[in-house]
């Protein structure tokens, strides 16, 4: 299966978006709630319908950007948040994105990538973060499968992928996952070295 722009457009247009829970996930909401610096520049890669963006804006964060391969979810966001600045919605391949951010929020993007792209993801996140910038969010915690998305992984795999370029501040089973994801999510905070 090729996870192309067309593949993702079709998933959104056919409303085959089982990962979309219709609101911000509890682990990300509670993480955002403890952020005090409203001037942070934040990127949400593979943002989809990006309830995280909406929640951040409602809570005073202004420098928030969503990048997605597909245009359909970006149109949905525009309908929900008409006052959003056009530059905050970026239709592009994450791996071709330029810029520098204080924080990258991860919610179902990493698990949707073909596993062979994981090392490339780590390098790209590193290049997009400012010095001491952070990537935080959730990874799925179930055996890596050949069938996906989503593709699983383990705490050990994530540690091995990130530890060369990042300080692992937190990487634990999320205590506050929604019921269908309970015990299957690892909440993490990694800081760029």
Image (cartoon, rainbow, N blue to C red):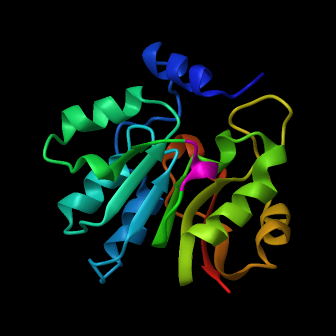
In magenta segment, residue 96: yes
In magenta segment, residue 42: no
* 164 up-or-down from 32: above or below: below
For the image, the number of numbered tags is 0
Q: Position of residue 144 (x, y in %)?
A: 84, 44
- Residue 115 lies in what quarter of the image? top right
- Residue 74 lies in what quarter of the image? top left
Q: Is residue 112 visible?
A: yes
The answer to whether residue 2 is left or right of residue 186 is right
In front here: 87 or 4? Answer: 87
Q: Position of residue 161 (x, y in %)?
A: 81, 66
Write the residue at 63% across / 65% down.
Answer: 125
In front here: 98 or 151? Answer: 98
Q: Is residue 143 visible?
A: no
Q: Residue furthest left?
A: 83
In front here: 63 or 146? Answer: 63
The answer to whether residue 175 is left or right of residue 80 is right
Q: Position of residue 34 (x, y in %)?
A: 35, 78
Image quarter (top left, top right, bottom left or bottom right) of the N terminus: top right
Please report the bounds of the magenta region as a residue range.
93-97
Write the residue at 76% across / 56% down.
Answer: 120
The answer to whether residue 180 is left or right of residue 171 is left
- Residue 35 lies in what quarter of the image? bottom left
């Amino acid at each position: 299966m090729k996870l192309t722009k067309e593949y993702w457009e079709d998933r959104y247009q056919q409303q085959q978006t089982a990962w979309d829970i219709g609101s911000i996930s509890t682990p990300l909401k509670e993480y955002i709630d403890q952020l005090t610096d409203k001037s942070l520049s934040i990127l949400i890669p593979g943002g989809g319908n990006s309830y995280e963006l909406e929640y951040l804006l409602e809570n005073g964060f202004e420098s928030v950007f969503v990048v997605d391969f597909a245009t359909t979810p970006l149109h949905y966001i525009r309908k929900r948040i008409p006052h959003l600045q056009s530059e905050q919605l970026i239709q592009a391949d994450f791996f071709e994105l330029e810029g520098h951010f204080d924080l990258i929020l991860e919610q179902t993007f990493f698990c949707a990538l073909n596993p062979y792209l994981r090392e490339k993801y780590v390098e790209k996140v590193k290049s997009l973060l400012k010095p001491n910038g952070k990537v935080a969010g959730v990874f799925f915690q179930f055996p890596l499968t050949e069938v996906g998305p989503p593709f699983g992984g383990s705490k050990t795999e994530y540690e091995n992928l990130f530890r060369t370029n990042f300080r692992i501040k937190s990487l634990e089973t999320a205590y506050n996952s929604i019921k269908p994801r309970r015990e299957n999510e690892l909440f993490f905070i990694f800081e760029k070295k």
